[in-house]
Image (spheres, grey):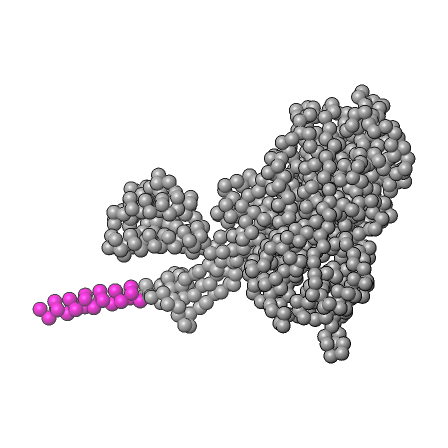
Amino acid sequence: MKKKIRARTLLFGGVMTLLFLILISRIYVVQVVEGAKWYELAKKRWSTEEQLVAKRGTIADRDGNVLAMDTIAYNVSVNPQLINEEELTEEIIDGLHDILGISKEELRKNVTAKKEDGTFVVNREIRNGGWQIDKALADKIRKFREELAKEKKVYDVGIDLAESLKRYYPRNSLASQVVGYLNKEGTAMTGIEASFDEQLSGENGLIKYEKDGKRVQLSEGEVEYKPAMDGQNIKLTIDSDIQHYVDEALQEIQKKYAPKSATAIAADPNTMEILAMANIPQYNPNEYWKNNANSYNHAIKSLYEPGSTFKIATLAAAVEEGVFNPDETYKSGRIKIKGIPNPIRDIKREGWGTITFLEGLKYSSNVAFVKLGYERLGEEKLRKYYTDFGFGQKTGIQLGSELKGSIRFQYPSEIANATFGQGVSVTPIQQVAAVAAVANGGKLLQPQIIKSITDPNTKTTTNIEPKVVRQVISEETSRKVGEYLEQVVSDQEKGTGKNAYIEGYRVAGKTGTAQKVDGINYSDTKFVVSFIGYAPVDNPKIVVYIVVDEPNDSLVGGGTVAAPAFKQIVLKSLRKMGVAPNYAADSENAAKEVTMTIPDVTDLKVDQAKAELKAKAVSFELVGNGKTVLQQIPAAGSSVHPTQRIYLITEQKEKLAIPDLKGVSLRDALEITSLIGIRLIPEGQGFVVSQKEETLNNVRVLKVVLAPPTGADGVVGTQDAETDAAENEEKAASAGNESSDEGQPAGTDEAADSDSNGSSPNNTAAE
């Protein structure tokens, strides 16, 4: 018995020893041999990782007004397994259908989604219609979810809202073709969004940390942190006010002429910064899926035959080479070119008889430019100047998919036709760059759409400077061409651009009406009409090009359709820029005045009044620190020059400070100072050019110097009536108790345009 017990004990002990050895061996393998492996697996179990999403950079206009930004959005998902278990399928489908507008068939596919084994999935995203919804819709879903849970007495109804970021465009369609858009997946599709996607996107970061069983971060655990690098912020050269003026003008064209499309570009000719770029039809990038075809930017991506606006390049070349004599005469109407079966004709087939070359420019005579370009300059020089002006090549503007166009120069007919803009394909941005070179002293500049780029991570800003490509013509040639083009606008009898005339400003410009190719021939009913010009001629501040594709009236030309829009844009823009009108006493058109009626903003909140006046491009100044407009000077309904400044009185007179009265007529100055309670002492006559506050016999007085509106620097003429010195002294002595508004005679600046062309194909361009 003892032997059996001893044997069993030894056996048991041996087994236990063996097991212990196996355990020790296993522990050794796990702890030593495979220790690193198991340590890494353990770390994964007690560590977690979260992605830190980088914020996409903003896009703003030149004044910092945001055009594109990230904002909070919500993504809807459902739990089909839970919904099926709680028998809520129909309620969920009906509720989401009412809130999101998604079809019930589409919702049913998501709410009843199953795996391959036939079991319901636990998460299904509602991508089509439930992705990146705004807070208002998200709140409705939350309310529906709570009410359904309460009604069915369940904790969870299987609807989830996940917070995310989406791209938001606060100005909606303003400059939308320039800014571009992101689709719902966050992919940059067009415009600045696509061209600068890498800079705007930034780089996501992450954080890894160790946690306990309750997912609480361990205080002494390892932490790996990589911060998110937010995207860079881009400031455009776009001026939102001028962009708004351009949009308004294009909308009027759309209402009146219903074209296939219309494009307008406004730029500073001295820097080639794009102040506005717009196309119609428009689209809203916040709802791009409704009409995203309208996101196409014709300004850089469409080619047009420019017609007679292209004559500016030929004219500049002819003046530079000394072959343009404005007083030299020629026979208009038609010209025969060797090797061309049909003669090239003017828009007026019988011509205007024997006229000067300057008159030919005013009438937009094709024959004049064939003589200048084809006969006198010749193929080699023409090609050089057209190339130097940037045609047939990309401008380099910082937007993708720009086209370069072409100029056909193989046959004599093509060379001759190119002189007046036929057989040439250009983009609107090329036209603007070329005419800006004519305006600014002869320098071709690269168009700029980016003002600056700021990196929020390094707090550094990169400013984009103007870039001169080449000197094309001399400053003297630039000056002469400007004076010639000015007469195309100012001559109200012969000038095709007379509808672009702006009283008080020197405007240079040229109309264009080009036949469109229909098959292999030029159409007699389909035209592209345009106008391009700049102002003021002696110190250009803005160049504007408007091109309209197929207006609904085939008899109208660029002078009828595009010139009035140009006038509207330029006048408002110059007023916004504070550019004073330049009146010339001996001007033939001095009596042709443009007036505006002062809107009524009395009793409006200051912010409302400012917004209304700003929208109408009315210059104004706040007098006082009140929140409501108590009075306005001049009074509502007054007829004044568009550059007249409006004073908004917001406080009682005892609290008012003296405003800047420069450019104000004596009558208005008297009314304002009388309201403030200060005596006015004028010197001279006309309009205020300087002011100085003094104390005279212990009485506060304001001395002002007035000068007539002769166009001197710094003089802002606002009315054409003048008050003589005796009347000034008499009114000043009465402390300005009597006042009145002097209006101006309205200008009769309307004239029919005659630059359309219905001649046979291949022998004449439309005007």
In the drawing, does residue 342 fall left or right of residue 602?
right
Residue in the image at 49% along x and 56% along y = 71
In the drawing, does residue 724 fall left or right of residue 629?
right
Q: Residue furthest left?
A: 1
The magenta-colored residue range is 1-24
Depth check: 567 or 517 in front? 567
Magenta span dominant secondary structure: helix
Q: How far across and how far down the image is residue 187, in percent?
A: 52, 47
Depth check: 748 or 5 in front? 748
Residue 197 covered by magenta stretch: no
Residue in the image at 79% along x and 66% along y = 729
In the rendered image, the vertical position of residue 20 relative to residue 320, given as above or below: below
Q: Residue furthest bottom?
A: 698
The answer to whether residue 208 is seen in the rendering is yes
Residue in the image at 33% along x and 66% along y = 214
In the rendered image, the vertical position of residue 664 relative to residue 397, given as above or below: below
Quarter of the picture containing the N terminus is: bottom left
Residue in the image at 24% along x and 55% along y = 153
